[in-house]
Amino acid sequence: MDKPELFVDGKRVDGRALDELRPVKVDAGVLSNADGSAYVEWGKNKVIAAVYGPREHIPRHGQNPYKANVRVKYNMTPFCSIDGHGRSGPNRRSTEISKVLEEVYENVVLTDHFPKTAIDVFIEVLQADGGTRIAALTAGAVALANAGIPMKDVVAGAASGKAGGKMILDLGKLEDNYGESDIPIGISPRTKEILLMQMDGLLTKQEIAEAIDLSFKGAEKVSELQKKALKDCYDKKMSEAGQGAQQ
Amino acid sequence: MSKIVVPGETLSDTPKPIAYGFTEGGKTYSSITGVFDEKNFRLIPIEGVYIPVVGDYVVGVVTDVKYAGYNVDIHSAYGAFLSNKETRDLFELGDLIVAKIKGVDEVKNVDLTDARKLKDGKVVNVVPSRVPRLIGKKSSMVNLVKDGTGTEIVIGKNGRIWLKGGNIGLATSAVEKIDDEAYTSGLTDRMAKYIGDNKQ
């Protein structure tokens, strides 16, 4: 198959501008059996996250007597990709993403409030179209906040990179597969700290700086959507009672 | 005025200690999703599991009968133990009890005392952080339900509510409604109307 044209008439394959995010939708509190949950649609990606905890740490070994262990399980469903591979279960990539997301959340969750417990974050990718780890990060963060788990911030992220020779924000599947570089970045919007940063491909120092800048702008937009989703959970009942959740 | 805040949201530009919040770099932030009462500078969580506190009364289930006492599940990440020395009664596996938390150690093991068996009745689970709203100022909310239904109600701070007798159907739906709308204002008046309308 020929390498597809990543730029047509100065626009990206899906018509977006260089610094334009795909449409993102965030909903909180979508599962009644979990302590906290979130559903994110990011372009064509569909991700759902469920949080349980803080709860008893099972198995007992690995329990930390001083704080809670945040355990993330990122998984792609057998039907999430275009070839419907039907294979399920963890692979090296999903183990890597699980570990990386665990480290992000452990940076912001106030784990020392709950010694010996476990906080489980389950993230399932129902449909994948490039950038799933960032969509997963976004959904997991909202699910944690929805569960009432004390944290220093609701983390957000956006990937940036290079495709067709141009620096772009939020790579889609095609741009990720055929482009020159992909950098997913996760941040704490409040402090502007970078909590996740991985990179495929080769870039100059200047290009990396541009990528970080693009990602920050994207992540800030996502952060607004996360906050709104969390508040909207309660907005309906509050407005029925004659108040607003968003004052 | 109250508004919903999320983790990381600024509550104050000065470092003012507040429960469920934290201070950093001279500012105060929320650590949870909750209702922020600006006037009284108070933060009330909307969701969250139960964290054992000394003095709380909790409703638990006996999960193990040991030589020296009982293991009790209090619907928390932390287990509880009722020593034989703390009670004259005998309990069996599966018994529902209400007990007071006598002590919580550094690793959050809970010791119970003053236990009493809850016979028959049913249990409704509410979000633990909403229990204060269910009780109300000077027990105003729970008394509203008790008076309007004649149901016996025992409230566990751990979110387990025991109901027995009276108009138990109305009591159950009233407790569930309070749990559902705990973070809204004017709830006491609405509940008074709800119970009045459905009394028959």
Image (tube, rainbow, N blue to C red):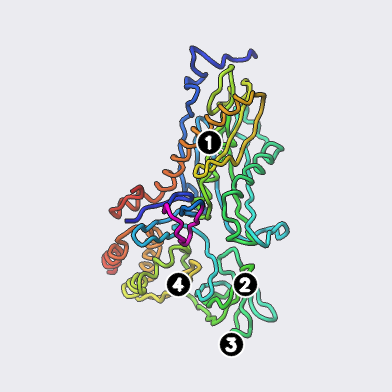
Q: In this orientation, which residue lies closer to the viewer: B192 or B85?
A: B85
Mark 1 vs 3: CB contact within 8 A:
no
Q: Earlier in the sequence, mark 2 or mark 4?
A: 2
Residue A79 appears in which quarter of the rendering? top right
What amino acid type should be assigned to the residue bearing mark 3? Arg
> Distance between the Cα atoms at labels 4 and 3?
22 Å
Q: Identify the subunit bearing mark 4.
A: B
Residue picked out by circle 3: B88
* Mark count: 4
Residue on which the image places disc 4: B155
Name which residue type carries label 1: Lys
Query: Which segment is the magenta one?
Result: B12-24
Which tag, 4 or 3, sits closer to the chain's start?
3
Q: Same chain for labels 2 and 4? Say yes or no.
A: yes
Q: Which residue is mark 2?
A: B105
Extreme residue in the bottom direction: B88
The location of residue A112, given as percent across then percent down, is 60, 59
Rendering coords of residue A230 (x, y %): 44, 47
**Vertical relation: B77 (above or below) A90:** below
